[in-house]
Image (cartoon, helix red, strand yellow):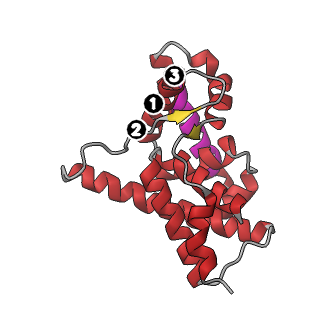
Amino acid sequence: MERIVDLVYRISFRILCDRFDSEEVTRKVLSYAKRREIVYDGGSNSKDWFIRHTCLLCRMSMVRRKTLWLMNIRNEVFVRATPRVEDQDDYTTKQAWQVYCRAVHGMTPLQVMAYVLCVLEGISEARVMKILNITKVRMSHLLKKATASIRGELAVYGRAELYRDFVSFIRRVDEVNKPQAKDLLTEYSDSVP
């Protein structure tokens, strides 16, 4: 079960670029699974259920954040996190993460979800199309636009040719204050039979 908690948190963190919102989404997914008595059994159907609901809650969170930002209740659309990569210095990691967050800010929620699931998580396009309930044409369009957005942000720094290195770097980003799976699992496991 810890693997599914890590997966839910990692996907939500990469979509939202915000540690606090990601923890909230992870808790909501786990509480919804608890209410519906969904148990992760290691199969692809239950894993897809968790991914689908993570994406749904992330989309709702993105819309809520943009609404609060437009109403001047929130200062920024996303809170810049301070991620860490084990063998890199903090400045390089922070700069790369900011480029990624700026690119995500310019994308639609579906573009971000398709990019995170296919490119960063390595899930097949066919499976992502099933999870997000979209067509193949829509999927290829979303990935093309998302990749162009990230390449555009890299071009601002004159680094567009380093796209592949950037993607592998972002895959290794791990949040410093990542919640322990055990903490998030406590709420879930207390009432699951």
Label 3: few (<14), some (14–19) or many (≥20) C-alpha neighbours in 10 Å: many
- Which amino acid type corresponds to the residue marked 1 in the rendered image? Gln
Of 88 and 58, the residue lying toward us: 88
- Figure check: 179 above or below 175: below
Q: Is residue 148 magenta?
A: yes
**Residue at x 65%, y 49% (from the top left corner):** 117
**Residue at x 47%, y 15% (from the top left corner):** 157
Tell me, yes or no, whether the two marked residues, 2 and 1, touch with CB atoms within 8 Å: yes
Q: Give the range drawn in magenta.
A: 139-151
- Which amino acid type corresponds to the residue marked 3 in the rendered image? Leu
- Figure check: 28 above or below 144: below
* Residue 64, image x, y percentages: 34, 59
- Horizontally, residue 41 falls left or right of residue 58, namely right
Q: Which of marks 3 and 1 is in front?
A: 1
* Residue 109, image x, y percentages: 48, 51
Label 1: few (<14), some (14–19) or many (≥20) C-alpha neighbours in 10 Å: some
- Quadrant hosting residue 88: top right
Q: Mark 3 points at which residue?
A: 154
- Which amino acid type corresponds to the residue marked 2 in the rendered image? Arg
- Figure check: 143 above or below 188: above
Q: What element carries label 3?
A: helix
Q: Is residue 77 magenta?
A: no
C-alpha distance separating marks 2 and 1: 7 Å
Q: Mark 2 points at which residue?
A: 80
